[in-house]
Image (spheres, rainbow, N blue to C red):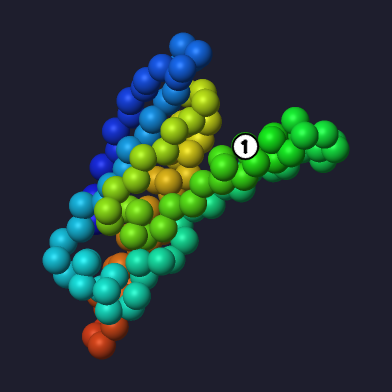
């Protein structure tokens, strides 16, 4: 498995930069087969939930709550297989998400390696 990452940016309507992280896994036919066989597709690799404002007692506060929930972010195995684009408000957020996606992808690569060894044995030289 290879993880392909691309960073881009664009301007919002107000002219502020929006930072974009695109990700996609490059998988062998064998790895795709394990994903299908073990039904890993919907498995969640990364999740970040928006936090509602505790002082949301006005209509504006309700709007803030909706905005925060709109900022919820999840990445599943299917997202890696098909590719996913994540937009971030600043570079620090994008780099933090990127680091967490790399770690999640590495963990999933370990899962695929384990899946490859079912029905066989592994010899570990000590």
Query: Is 58 above or below relative to 81?
Result: above
Secondary structure beneath disc 1?
A: helix
Question: Residue at (75%, 30%) from the top-left corner?
Answer: 60
Which image quarter: residue 8? Answer: top left
Q: In the image shown, does 85 or 69 lie closer to the viewer?
A: 69
Q: How many other residues sit within 10 Å of disc 1, few (<14), some (14-19) or many (≥20)?
A: some
Work out whether residue 16 or residue 47 is closer to the camera in this orientation and state it.
16
Residue 100 is left or right of residue 52, and the answer is left
Residue farthest toward the bottom in the current orientation of the protein? 119
What x and y, as percent, mark residue 77? 36, 60
Image quadrant containing the N terminus: bottom left
Q: Position of residue 37 (x, y in %)?
A: 27, 79
Residue at the left extreme of this rendering = 29
**In this figure, which residue is indicated by the disc labeled 1?**
67
Question: Quick one: 125 or 35, which is closer to the camera?
Answer: 35
Can you give x and y, in whole percent of width and height, for residue 85 in the image?
36, 40
């Amino acid at each position: 498995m290879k993880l392909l990452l691309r960073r881009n940016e664009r301007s919002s309507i107000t002219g502020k930069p929006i930072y974009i992280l695109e990700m996609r896994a490059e998988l062998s036919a064998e790895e795709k087969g394990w994903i299908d066989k073990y039904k890993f597709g919907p498995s969640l690799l990364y999740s970040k939930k928006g936090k509602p404002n505790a002082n949301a007692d006005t209509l504006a506060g309700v709007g803030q709550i909706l905005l925060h929930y709109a900022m919820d972010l999840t990445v599943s195995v299917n997202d890696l297989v098909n590719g996913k684009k994540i937009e971030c408000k600043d570079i620090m957020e994008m780099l933090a998400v990127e680091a967490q996606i790399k770690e999640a992808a590495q963990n999933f690569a370990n899962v695929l390696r384990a899946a490859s060894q079912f029905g066989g044995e592994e010899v570990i030289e000590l």
